[in-house]
Amino acid sequence: MSWRITDISYVSVAVNNLETAVADFKRLYGLEEVSSVSVSRPYGWLRIVMGNGAECFQEILQPTNETLPLARFVRDKGEGIYVTSFVVDNLEECARELRAKGVRFATGPEGARPERVSAVWIHPRATTGVYVELTEHLLQRGAPAAGAAGSAPLLKELSYLAVVVRDLKAATKLYQDMLHLDLIRDGLKDEEFGYEATQIGIGDRMLMEIQHPYDESKPMGRFLKNRGEAPYFASFVVDDPKQAVETIQSRGGTALLTGSGIGWIHPKSYHGQMVELIPRHLGR
């Protein structure tokens, strides 16, 4: 094997209004802007990256051209997860192998994203609705800094992506074969939420959890029925899920803590992206 995924870099959320989303992420989660706003006319978006200073993990995209894919995504599906970016150790070999396998790429105007020229994008139709970026490097990271209003950022780092699929076995094999990911755990089942799952990643570090709902009356089952296969949520590491949930609630956001001590941010408080909050020992 001539290439390997080494890390998860960031997740994109497509939004209706960039300024509003940035203000919400600052107010609710203490995130800070780690890039200036950039404009891409060829791709039809405004873009900014947010994080906690040391970690740059949340890209925010606002469509500016109603005829291009990002605008169609927001129009048809609403705000939500758009792209997930993974770092590879040899992009040239990665691209060569994927092309040889006939994997469908999502292509764009040459040089339209000069800050990400060393990257390829796998079209969602080649996966289970997940728009995958493969790049040679993490986003540029600066020194840690205080979050909004002098508060420490609640979200420390991006842990993994959860994906909802129709066929668990087929989807697991697809991602293993396409992205050279290892099977970490299988046979997982959650009766309360009505789904079964597998976990894949590198070594013992999970990068994706692939979930198949078997009960259409549960939220995940309704999601699959209404939206089809797609990213379901992004998982972030926090120092203390209980404290994070209480802080988000005190700032006007909608979040809850489960009996297992895991926190959840409702999509309406994260511009269409559901977020899991896990303690560090469960993350990377």
Image (cartoon, rainbow, N blue to C red):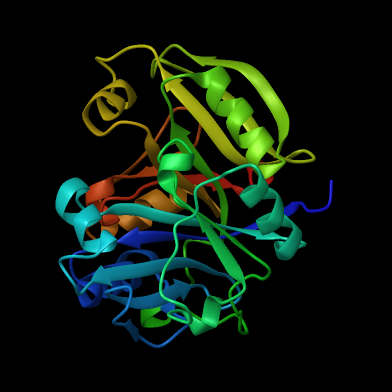
Q: Position of residue 215 (x, y in %)?
A: 33, 12
In the visual, does 178 lie left or right of 104? right
Q: Nearer the viewer, residue 237 or 9?
A: 9
Residue visible at 44% across and 11% down?
A: 191
- The relative height of residue 256 versus residue 63 in the rendered view (above or below) is above
Residue visible at 25% across and 70% down?
A: 62
Q: Quadrant of residue 65?
A: bottom left
In the visual, does 1 lie left or right of 228? right
Q: Nearer the viewer, residue 130 or 223?
A: 130
Q: Quadrant of residue 108?
A: bottom left
Q: Position of residue 208 (x, y in %)?
A: 58, 39
- The relative height of residue 15 versus residue 244 in the rendered view (above or below) is below
Which residue occupies the extreme right position in the image? 1
In the visual, does 257 lie left or right of 252? right
Q: Nearer the viewer, residue 86 or 2?
A: 2
Q: Nearer the viewer, residue 40 or 35?
A: 40
Q: Position of residue 235 (x, y in %)?
A: 50, 47
Q: Position of residue 29 (x, y in %)?
A: 38, 64
For the N terminus, the image quarter is: top right
- The relative height of residue 240 versus residue 55 in the rendered view (above or below) is above
Residue visible at 15% across and 67% down?
A: 66
Q: How many marks?
A: 0
* Whether residue 65 can be seen here: yes
Q: Quadrant of residue 25?
A: bottom left
* Whether residue 276 can be seen here: no
